[in-house]
Amino acid sequence: MKYEIIAVPPVLQSFVRCFWTLEGNAKPALSQVFGSLVDGRPGLIFQDAAAGTLIMEDKQLPDLFLYGQTTKHTEIMAAGTFRATGVMFHPHALKSVFGMNAAELTNSCIDPDQVSVKKSKGLSMKLAEASSVEEQVKILKSYLQTQISNKRAHITGIVEYAVSQILTSNGNISLKDLQEDLQITEKSLERKFKDHVGIPPKLFSGICRYQASLHQLRNNQYNKLSDIAYENDYADQSHFIRSFKKYTGCSPFQFQKQFSPE
């Protein structure tokens, strides 16, 4: 497996977390890179159909797709070898970059050409005709800069601040305190979150908490499972296990056994 993370130019850093490329031929490779798609961040993926195809829930994924928040366990598999190039956005980027209500893409995906500001030669065709992965990344950077420029993209300060606070706290911040800090009502914050992030702040916080626990488990940063539950503010170990299984598709013990080195 070959996986590479590519730096983001300054002009895109407010909207894009990273660009990445992935090439391989094994299910474990996909699992290790994508992990759980429940990560609080939307993205865009282009797969080279000539190299193989990616499959999700028994359906072949399109060559190019823009996806939103994922709130349930979803597994990506490969039909043989595969080669893909992608973009990982910040949680609030869909509204800012594509001018769409982020909730429309929660647990769903779309051809980005449908929401592109420039209706010239399709992005998918440009990426397919690129002579190298480096050229594909260059095309994606140019495409997103055009999107941002034409949409006059901006980030709502309230949403940006709230997302930042939730991420920094690994989802363990009091939403009531956050609302008071922002001087905003619960309903107003929830409405802004659904519009820009795609899900309510409470669900986003839960996903951040889950991701923090997943990181601990992957890196063996605990002595017993109850440590992870306690440190990530779960009510108890059983609540942690239920949440983990909901988002990962297996229990923490099964996950550890599956991904621990032999």
Image (tube, helix red, strand yellow):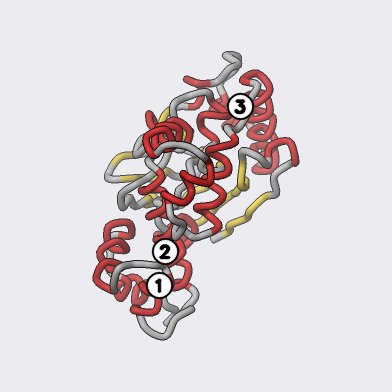
For residue 78, side relative to residue 221 (left or right): left
Is residue 67 visible to the viewer in this orientation of the structure? Answer: no
Distance between the alpha carbons at the discs numbered 3 and 1:
37 Å
Amino acid at circle 1: Phe
For residue 168, side relative to residue 60 (left or right): right
Identity of the residue drawn at 58% across and 58% down:
2
Q: Quadrant of residue 101?
A: top left
Q: Which mark is residue 126?
A: 3
> 245 or 258: nearer the eye?
245
Amino acid at circle 3: Lys
Tag 1 or tag 3, which sits nearer the N-term?
3
Quick check: marks 3 and 1 in contact, CB under 8 Å?
A: no
Mark 1: which secondary structure? helix
Q: Position of residue 25 (x, y in %)?
A: 46, 57
For residue 74, side relative to residue 85 (left or right): left
Question: What residue did someone put label 1 on?
Answer: 259
In this rendering, the answer to whether 177 lies above or below 226 is: above
Question: What residue did someone put label 2 on?
Answer: 28
Q: Please state which of the two labelled residues, at mark 3 or mark 1, is closer to the viewer.
A: 1
Q: Position of residue 225 (x, y in %)?
A: 35, 78
Distance between the alpha carbons at the discs numbered 1 and 2:
8 Å
Where, quadrant-wise, is the C terminus in this rendering?
bottom left
